[in-house]
Image: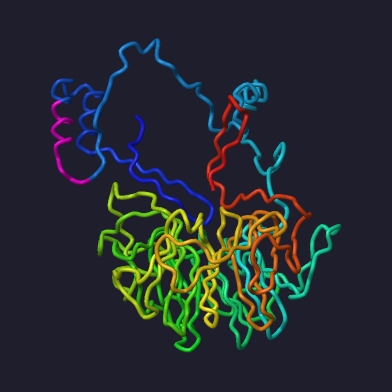
Amino acid sequence: MAPILNSVFAGSGKTKVFVYGIISVISLSAILLVLAGTLDPGKADRAYRAALRVPNGQAQLTAAEPITNQDAAPMCVWEPVSATSGSLAAFQQARPTSTTASTRPIDFASQKPVRTIRDPYAAYSAVAVDPINNEVILTDENLFQILVYDRLANTPAQAKMTEPKRVLGGLETKIEFQCGLYIDPKNGDIYAVNNDTVDTLVIFSRDQKGNVPPKRELITVHGTFGIAVDEAAQELFMSVQHENAVIVYQKLAQGKDAPLRFIQGGKTQLADPHGMAIDTKKQLMFVANHGGFHEKIPGAEPALSFAGAGGKDVPNWPDGGQKPGSGKNLPPSITVYPLKGRGDLAPLQVIQGPKTRLNWPTGLAVDEDAGELYVANDMDDSIAVFDITANGDVAPKRMIRGSKSMIKNPTGVWLDFKNKEVWSANFGNHSATVYPMGASGDVAPLRMIRSGPLNEQALGIGNPHPVGYDSKREQLIVPN
């Protein structure tokens, strides 16, 4: 019996689709009784129809049609779970003929794949500059690394890549899908937040390298994405993608420390939030939203953390309960809040509409002196710049965009005020590109750092889930 579609939403920067189904217990019980022969079909029909009238707010069975001619019904070919491929013929050919041999377990560890689809190069997802040490730091969501380069590095066109000065990576580091990045302006500490599989913010000193534990870590809500720090107030801000929330901690929080406050609720218009940035002069917070939305049930259940933190007894921990059937896709947006805001509060400004050209806005950066907001506009292949005061359906005041710019699926943006430069982390072509502050139009970068060959498109595979196969078109379908 096919599951009933309950909700669909996007996540993790790279699109994910989740499908939930639920069948009412009463209806299912009635069907099972019929199959067991203990309840006649007429009574079963009345039982499940009565169950349908229960206003429990959940998805329920609405119809059941018996197969009248079982011989004519299409059936799947049974395939043993021990088969090593999708081909039943291949399994049968390889199956031992003797009874004794057939009981021998298959040594899967010794078998090698026929071929592999993977990207061998780093896919940059976030960028930050350490102006004191003249270094640029990039996160790699493909090979699970944090890479440190000389700020003035420039990969020659004929070279395959530029070697980093230092690399952080390996199981001890807890680095996986690092998408939010921040560099402490005083000591060079690297803050990197994991969005998907390891629910931790990890902090490394600037001299750490290799497969080493972080010097400090903070357990986060599952789906945390963006990060920003108010150095004056010593507060750390993080957006939570799956829970449509922003959480604020003390900057030096660690372990299972509780948040100071959070923003969440229907009034906020937070919808699949990703990158964020703050303006300490105007005391504003900016959040980029992809648009996936679902209503929360206040107090129903706490937001999830696979690392073991949170719960109803933890102060300021956001809600995780989702109202069934409330999922919908909204236009992408930038929402603006007071820096000290908390709870279910409406945004002060909303940048949203076709004139904005927003299409999966991801990374954000603020130029407080110029009063400008920079947006890494992922699916538009652009860096868009808005006035801090922008509100409604307004066009960007300028954009860096075009074939000369080499910007492809940018997911991170950073402003280097000391050197008057704008950096873009391009997830789509293994590159980080840099431009003069104030650049506009289809301009060539001042420099480019590449992890792979020039003009070679990245595969964009990130946390792939079960693979489907289209036999008509002979294509693999890979949700990420």
Q: Nearer the viewer, residue 236 or 385?
A: 385
The reply to whether the magenta stretch includes residue 430 is no
In the drawing, does residue 462 fall left or right of residue 151?
A: left
The reply to whether the magenta stretch includes residue 53 is yes
What is the count of numbered marks?
Answer: 0
Q: Nearer the viewer, residue 418 or 437?
A: 437
In the drawing, does residue 90 fall left or right of residue 463?
A: right
Q: Residue 166 appears at what percent x and percent y?
A: 74, 73
User: Residue 61 is drawn in which quadrant?
Assistant: top left
Q: Determine the residue positioned at 48% across, 63% down.
A: 274
In the drawing, does residue 294 fall left or right of residue 105?
A: left
Q: Residue 418 appears at what percent x and percent y?
A: 66, 84
In the drawing, does residue 141 fall left or right of residue 335?
A: right
Q: Residue 115 appears at what percent x and percent y?
A: 72, 39
Q: Determine the residue positioned at 29% across, 69% down.
A: 344
Q: Determine the residue positioned at 26% across, 25% down.
A: 64
Asked whether the viewer can see residue 222, the reply is: no
Q: Residue 340 appears at what percent x and percent y?
A: 36, 80
> Which stretch did the figure color magenta?
46-57
Q: How is the image coloured?
A: rainbow
In the orientation shown, which residue stands out farthest toward the right? 158
Quarter placement of the N terminus: top left
Instruction: Say above or below: 177 vs 204.
Output: above
Asked whether the viewer can see residue 271, the reply is: yes
Instruction: Say above or below: 386 vs 18.
Output: below
